[in-house]
Image: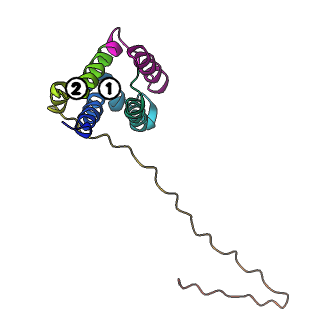
Amino acid sequence: PTEHDKWNAFECGLRQAILQWNIIKLALENDFGGPDTPKKVQILTDYLIDRYGSQPPSEDELEDYLYDFLTNNLSCDLDEGIVEEFVDLLMALESECASGNFTTANRILANPQPPLVVPQKPILQVKEEKPPRPEPMDDEWTVVTNKRKK
């Protein structure tokens, strides 16, 4: 496999692994991180992809980052070992894909989750303000404006 194939398998596997992780599923289903939970999960995913793309993190760095992110951004109560188990999966995924072995990636991808949908904030619409009503003139005449829409 080419380097592109290896990276693609890793990236697809990592994205799916995050969406399949029970703590992330619960966070998304229950808005643990508030209304921006999907966006926060996307930030986590993008960070991990970027981090692995530049210099893969050590196991300890990854565990620390995930603990901090999940508790501070998604308000998750983490069971003992949940982060370590996920980090083991990511380390195996990265190691195998780098060597051209896609066993773990294929296992993850065999059970795809729907893609993460990050809601876009609506574009603010400017309300058209009505012009002020004309004041009567000194000669008691009133200026009349055209009421038809243009």
**Which of the 4 image quarters holds residue 37?**
top left
The percent coordinates of residue 120 (x first, y second) are 42, 49
| Gap in angstroms between the C-alphas marked 2 and 1 | 33 Å
- The kind of residue tagged 1 is Leu
**Foreground residue among 70 and 98:** 98
- Residue 22 sits above or below residue 28 on the image: above
- Please tell me whether mark 1 sits on a helix, a strand or a loop: helix
Q: Is residue 38 left or right of residue 101?
A: right
Q: Residue at x 26, y 38 (%)?
A: 8
Q: Which residues are magenta?
A: 58-84
**Foreground residue among 51 and 126:** 51
Q: Residue at x 43, y 22 (%)?
A: 70
The percent coordinates of residue 115 (x first, y second) are 27, 41
**Foreground residue among 15 and 126:** 15
- The kind of residue tagged 2 is Ser
The percent coordinates of residue 6 (x first, y second) are 24, 34
**Foreground residue among 46 and 102:** 102
- Screen quadrant of the N terminus: top left
Q: Which residue is mark 1?
A: 26
The percent coordinates of residue 136 (x first, y second) are 78, 84
Q: Residue at x 15, y 25 (%)?
A: 103
Q: Residue at x 47, y 20 (%)?
A: 68
Q: Is residue 3 left or right of residue 69?
A: left
- Residue 131 sits above or below residue 121 on the image: below
Res. 74 mark: none
- Please tell me whether mark 2 sits on a helix, a strand or a loop: loop
Magenta-drawn stretch contains 46: no
Q: Please, which residue is most extreme toward the right here?
A: 138
Magenta-drawn stretch contains 74: yes
Q: Which residue is mark 2?
A: 99
